[in-house]
Structure formats: C-alpha cells, structure tokens
Image: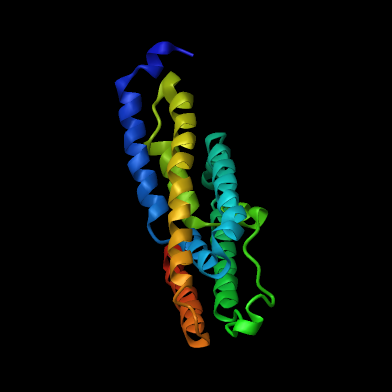
C-alpha cells in the first residue's frame, strides 16, 4: 500500500466528513432506531445486544457487497429496486402490527414476544431503505478516485461501524430509560401504539 495515500490529508478530511454523515444517518430516527428503542424498553439492554450486533453485521455485509459491485445491479435490472422496496414495505407493516398487538398485561408480557435475533436484524438491513441509502452514499460520495478508492472505501466501512455501534446503544438506552415509566397496561399499550406509528411514519421514505 502506498504510504503517500495513508498520509494524504484529503483522505482524512474525507473520513472526517464521512464520520459526520454516519452520525447523522445512525442517530436520526429510522426503522432500526425505532426498533432498538422499542426493544430496549421491552427487553432491556442485554437482551437487545444480538439485535445491535445483527445491525452491524448486516450493514457491513451490505456495505462490502455494494463496494464489490452489487449496487450496479440496480442500474442493469431496475425492477430489483422495486422488489426490494415492496419487501421492505411488507416487512415494516408486519413489524408495526407486532408492536401494536404486543401483550400489555404484566402477567403476559413475555407471551409470544422475543427480541429480534442477530440474523433477523442482519437480514433486515438488506431490505431497509435507509441502510441502502446511507451505504450507496458512502460508497460514492465518500471515496477517493483512482488508486485511493479501496483504501478510502475500507476506511469508510470502519468509520461507519465505529460511529454506528455507539449510536445504536444510545437508542437502546433511551428505550431502557423509558421502560421505567411503562408501569401500567395503559402506558404500555400507548407506547406500543406510538412505536408502531413511528414505523408507519417511516413508510413514505420507502414509497417516494
């Protein structure tokens, strides 16, 4: 690897900009963060760890796949984008339904409920429009041309994870803090409806 590339100020300025972009994308509300906050409220931080790990695994695999040329398939086969979009729509509707129909009675809170698994969270990134948007932007706007491409691209993968990991925890901690106030059936029901509603609010991002 050319040492001049590593010492290139433009590379590190670009990575600093990428870090700000990643912070914006991972800290603002979206399907992942809404589900993390809900999981933190219902299951606590420790039981949500596989969900967090799955997001990072899925995002990283998607990121590397786009870098290796998967994103070009959407240019060759535009209908794939529509398939992805409607798969995301159906899955988010399913998740919203699961949220609003979750048990709220204290004696039945664990019936039919479990946190999202590592694999479920990882696979969700492949149909999550926000993940695709942020990944494609990182791979195009925050990489260098020519021989500096792969170094900047791989550093972008690292930056995305370094920023995204603590950002995910922030939303889980917010949910866990909220859980202390969810001490009645009515409050739990209202919280479930609110989180389900937030997921529905994210749907226009998919349909536009």
Check the image and tell me how it is coloured. Answer: rainbow
The image shows residue 50 at horizontal and vertical percentages of 62, 53
Label tally: 0
The image shows residue 194 at horizontal and vertical percentages of 44, 77
Q: Farthest bottom residue?
A: 186
Placement of 16 over or under 197, stated as above or below: above
Q: Farthest top residue?
A: 3
Q: Is residue 75 visible?
A: yes
Horizontal placement of 16 versus 166: left or right? left
Q: Residue sitting at 65 percent across and 68 percent down?
A: 114
Q: Is residue 124 visible?
A: no
Horizontal placement of 7 versus 74: left or right? left
Considering depth in this image, is 150 or 119 the residue closer to the camera? 119
Q: Residue sitting at 47 percent across and 53 percent down?
A: 168
Q: Farthest right residue?
A: 112
Q: Quadrant of the C terminus?
A: bottom left
Horizontal placement of 177 versus 109: left or right? left
The image shows residue 68 at horizontal and vertical percentages of 57, 34
The image shows residue 102 at horizontal and vertical percentages of 60, 79
Considering depth in this image, is 206 or 56 the residue closer to the camera? 56
Placement of 119 over or under 7, stated as above or below: below
Q: Residue sitting at 67 percent across and 53 percent down?
A: 119
């Amino acid at each position: 690897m050319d040492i001049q590339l590593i010492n290139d100020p433009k590379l590190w300025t670009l990575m600093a900009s990428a870090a700000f972009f990643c912070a914006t994308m991972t800290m603002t509300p979206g399907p992942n963060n809404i589900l993390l906050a809900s999981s933190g409220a219902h299951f606590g931080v420790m039981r949500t760890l596989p969900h967090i790990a799955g997001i990072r695994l899925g995002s990283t695999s998607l990121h590397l796949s786009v870098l290796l040329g998967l994103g070009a398939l959407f240019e060759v086969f535009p209908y794939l984008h529509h398939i992805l979009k409607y798969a995301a729509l159906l899955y988010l509707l399913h998740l919203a339904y699961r949220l609003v129909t979750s048990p709220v009675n204290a004696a039945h809170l664990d019936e039919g409920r479990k946190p999202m698994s590592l694999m479920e969270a990882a696979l969700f990134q492949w149909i999550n429009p926000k993940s695709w948007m942020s990944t494609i932007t990182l791979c195009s706007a925050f990489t260098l041309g020519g021989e500096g491409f792969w170094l900047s691209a791989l550093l972008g993968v690292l930056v995305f994870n370094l920023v995204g990991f603590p950002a995910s925890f922030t939303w889980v901690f917010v949910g866990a803090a909220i859980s202390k106030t969810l001490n009645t059936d009515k409050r739990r029901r209202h919280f479930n409806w609110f989180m389900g509603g937030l997921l529905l609010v994210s749907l226009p991002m998919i349909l536009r």
